Image: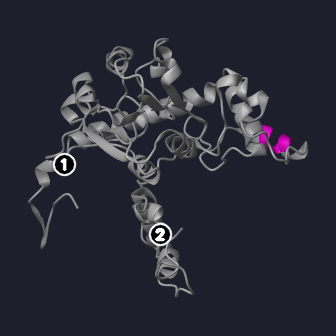
Amino acid sequence: MTNNMEQKINNSSSKGGGREGATLSDRLNRLAPSATLAMSQRSSELKAQGVDVINMSVGEPDFNTPDHIKAAAIKAVEDNWSRYSPVPGYPELKKAYAPGQILCSNGAKQSVCNTIMALVNAGDEVIIPAPYWVSYPQMVLLAEGTPVFVEATIEQDFKITPAQLEAAVTPKTRALILCSPSNPTGSVYSKKELEALKDVLLKYPNVIVVADEIYEHINYVGEHASMAQFPDIKDRVVLINGVSKAYAMTGWRIGSVSQKAAEAAFAGPQQCVEDMRLAFERRKNLIVKLAKEIPGLEVNDPQGAFYLFPKCSSFFGKKDGDRVINTR
């Protein structure tokens, strides 16, 4: 819903009822607009005005969907895969994993939100390592929960420690959202690091891990590690993954036809994934090198995803003309 639409709804006249105006629910009014989408919209507006803009907001590969995946979707249309699909997804797609443990949604963002809505009650706390993807706390607020932020600095490669996790857990803690490879930092938790966090969580059996692994295949350190790989905690892990990043399918979403395309993505040749990963790695190496040459920027070397999260606090308090540089 756009800000203009929200304003129209909030300013509408009321014809009865206990509230003034046709306002949105309190649940929605607690949420902040998506900063990512706001930046993307502003970029589009400037481009429409003829301004040369590089959009660095939404996390989207610039590759086209591989041809064999597009061909599978075209065939699905021709074969009339156009009816309502099973709620948990087509069995053929789910066979890529353990079918009894898989649910298909329209996208990873919906999967995270569905999970939070299914797990969190009013007053429950959800631990979110920071820096974090902007939508995580809003999802928790939508479920009437309380986001609890754990700050991970550039000095620790933006990854929380077991001690930090232990300190953040309370009797109200219901979940930990863990994104690896990370949006927005590109940091990747190793198996050893995940195991150390797991050992803390074993003390708190009511805490569920929401493992956002949508960038699994865009990593530069080799084998991907997952919290779900540990037998003593895997039943408390909700693993979120999808085709949007690894297979350049951000706009597909998983309806009937798209499930057949996703099936081809998982079951078909995987060289396309490696080709894109190598291209991302070349770009990462270049941008890290160039960013490190900028005086005042402190830069780590991301191990995955396609983000760079430089520390720029050295510029705070300085002026750009009449404007003082600060956090906002």
**Is there any visible trace of residue 158 in the rendered image?**
yes
Magenta-colored span: 71-76
| Residue at x 15%, y 49% (from the top left corner) | 313
Image vertical order of residue 137 relative to residue 224, above or below: below
Decide which of 64, 310 is in the foreground and name it.
Answer: 310
Horizontal and vertical percent position of residue 269 = 69, 25
Above or below, comparing residue 110 to residue 16 in the picture: above
Q: Residue at x 16, y 60 (%)?
A: 326
Where on the picture, by quarter, is residue 221?
Answer: top left
Q: Which residue lies most toward the front here?
A: 18
The answer to whether 283 is drawn above or below residue 44 in the figure is: above
Residue 53 visible: no
Element at badge 2?
A: helix
Mark 2 burial class by Cα count in 10 Å: few <14, some 14-19, many 20+: some
Q: Which residue is depicted at the point 78% across and 29% down? A: 91
Real-space Cα separation, disc 1 to disc 2, in angstroms = 27 Å
Residue at which label 2 appears: 47
Left or right of residue 161, residue 321 in this image: left
Please state which amino acid type lies under the numbered disc 2. Answer: Lys
The residue at the far right in this view is 79
Q: Amino acid at mark 1?
A: Cys
Residue 246 occupies which quadrant of the picture? top right
Quadrant in which the C terminus appears: bottom left
* Circle 1 SS class: loop
Residue 312's mark? Answer: 1
Main SS of residues in magenta: helix
| Location of residue 177 in the rendering, given as x and y in whole percent from the top left corner | 41, 35
Mark 1 packing: few (<14 Cα in 10 Å), some, or many (20+)? some
* 134 relative position to 260: left or right: left
Q: Earlier in the sequence, mark 1 or mark 2?
A: 2
Position of 297 with respect to 231 (left or right) is left
